[in-house]
């Protein structure tokens, strides 16, 4: 189990590292590097829009890679996803700026984001299934949280890389070329991740299901025919986790650095702390779900998220460095509480023959609703109607997630061979 968990952990660490450094760079340097001609406000909106591009591509990636993951196997699909994600990130590090090649720079940036989004669409679901289909039933929550723990460490690692880079060079050098260093360092993680994944074996659950029951010809259609209700509700369950994660990595980071003038060092240090907080809370909540069930933990965590998001933005605008750090850490704490049991919950929710596809659809549709849309419109709604109004919109969305958790039945103890 340790070897299996490490294979998923390292791969998801790379995925989240790549996504985190992109989100951080979009918040602090991309507006001036690739979208300087749009002005400060327009450049920020455009940079955040490129984050959304990847989220739009992710459901398509979940269908494509889910199809091959359900028909061909988890292992080969995960290797392909990892390779695409890593190469896309490295190429962003080499991309010329808008001042150098004009409009071609943002166009190439968007194309690389689409490549990353397609790969991310197949990565997390496959990594989660690789662990959950191998774990002992009474410890499935614990082991299935390994991918999200890798993601939490990646958030800290990405912020730490930016922090060390910014502290070891002048602001001019950082904006000129230093921001590229975290992207290029991804090549080291890519080599390590590929080595580990190539050596792993296919899951026994997949092999037994393929041998004894046959594989669905079109997993996407089979999933919707059999469990469209679970797919719809499963999407909503994960929305608050994505919303809190990406609001912190994009809007909150940008607000702290540019509006509150807290400085990149403090903002990035708090982002490092947020990853460690997510790691701790995801570990605890996943273990708790093995004892009391997935559903009670998810209901409690999403309810807490609904209450917190109402207070988050009014508190954030108090212009205090300590309050800013508190907002980041509390958001990460709740984010981890939701993500912790989700891997086991989603794996147990769907049938083996289309599980990869269904889990990927839930995860990536939730990413659009929670991760892509809110950061894009947060600034506009807050400036036009106030921070409490935006908190109210998000609380209403989060309340739907709570109701979805209530509507779904408990899955703890279910067999993954069906």
Image (cartoon, grey):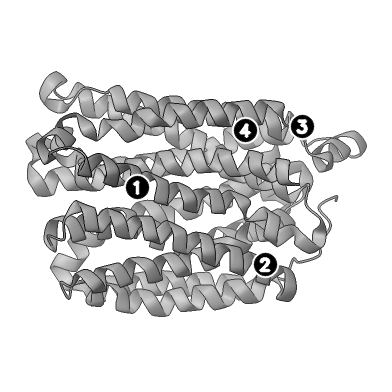
| N-terminal label among 1 and 3 | 1
Give the image location of residue 74, x and y in percent.
70, 35
Of 37 and 67, nearer the camera is 37
Q: Residues within 10 Å of mark 4 (few under 14, many from 20)?
A: many
Residue holding disc 1: 160
How far apart marks 4 and 3 lie (CA) works out to 12 Å
Residue holding disc 3: 201
Q: Residues within 10 Å of mark 3 (few under 14, many from 20)?
A: few
Query: Is residue 271 something one can see in this rendering?
Result: yes
Residue 287, numbered label? 2
Q: Residues within 10 Å of mark 2 (few under 14, many from 20)?
A: many
Of 256 and 349, nearer the camera is 256
User: In the figure, is residue 49 to the left or right of 202?
Assistant: left
Residue holding disc 4: 78
Residue at 51 percent of width and 64 percent of height: 336
- Tag 4, which secondary structure? helix
């Amino acid at each position: 189990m340790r070897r299996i968990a490490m294979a998923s952990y390292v791969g998801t660490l790379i995925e989240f590292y790549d996504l985190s450094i992109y989100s951080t760079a979009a918040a602090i340097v991309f507006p001036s590097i690739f979208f300087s001609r749009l002005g400060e406000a327009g450049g920020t909106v455009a940079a955040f829009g490129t984050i959304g591009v990847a989220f739009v591509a992710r459901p398509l990636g979940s269908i494509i890679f889910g199809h091959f993951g359900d028909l061909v196997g988890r292992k080969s699909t995960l290797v392909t996803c990892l390779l695409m994600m890593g190469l896309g990130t490295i190429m962003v590090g080499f991309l010329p700026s808008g001042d150098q090649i004009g409009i071609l720079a943002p166009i190439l940036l968007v194309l690389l984001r689409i490549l990353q989004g397609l790969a991310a669409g197949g990565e997390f679901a496959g990594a989660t299934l690789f662990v959950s289909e191998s774990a002992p039933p009474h410890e499935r929550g614990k082991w299935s949280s390994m991918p999200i723990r890798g993601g939490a460490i990646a958030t800290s690692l990405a912020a730490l890389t930016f922090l060390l880079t910014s502290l070891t060079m002048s602001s001019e050098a950082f904006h000129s070329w230093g921001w590229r260093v975290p992207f290029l360092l991804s090549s080291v993680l890519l080599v390590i991740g590929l080595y580990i994944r190539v050596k792993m074996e296919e899951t026994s659950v997949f092999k037994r299901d393929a041998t004894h029951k046959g594989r669905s010809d079109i997993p996407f259609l089979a999933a919707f025919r059999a469990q469209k209700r679970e797919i719809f509700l499963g999407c909503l369950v994960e929305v608050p986790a994505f919303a809190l994660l990406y609001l912190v990595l994009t809007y909150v980071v940008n607000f702290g650095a540019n509006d509150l003038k807290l400085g990149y060092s403090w903002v990035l240090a708090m982002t490092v702390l947020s990853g460690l907080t997510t790691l701790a809370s995801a570990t605890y909540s996943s273990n708790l779900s093995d004892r009391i069930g997935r559903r009670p933990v998810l209901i409690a965590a999403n309810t807490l998220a609904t209450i917190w998001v109402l207070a988050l933005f009014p508190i954030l605008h108090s212009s205090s460095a300590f309050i800013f750090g508190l907002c980041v850490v509390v958001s990460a704490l709740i984010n981890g509480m939701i993500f912790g049991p989700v891997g086991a919950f989603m794996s147990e929710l769907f049938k083996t023959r289309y599980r990869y596809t269904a889990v990927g659809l839930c995860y990536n549709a939730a990413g659009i609703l929670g991760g892509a849309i809110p950061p894009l419109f947060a600034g506009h709604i807050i400036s036009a109607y106030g921070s409490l109004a935006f908190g109210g919109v998000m609380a209403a969305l989060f309340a739907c997630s709570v109701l979805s958790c209530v509507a779904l039945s408990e899955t703890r103890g279910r067999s993954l061979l069906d």
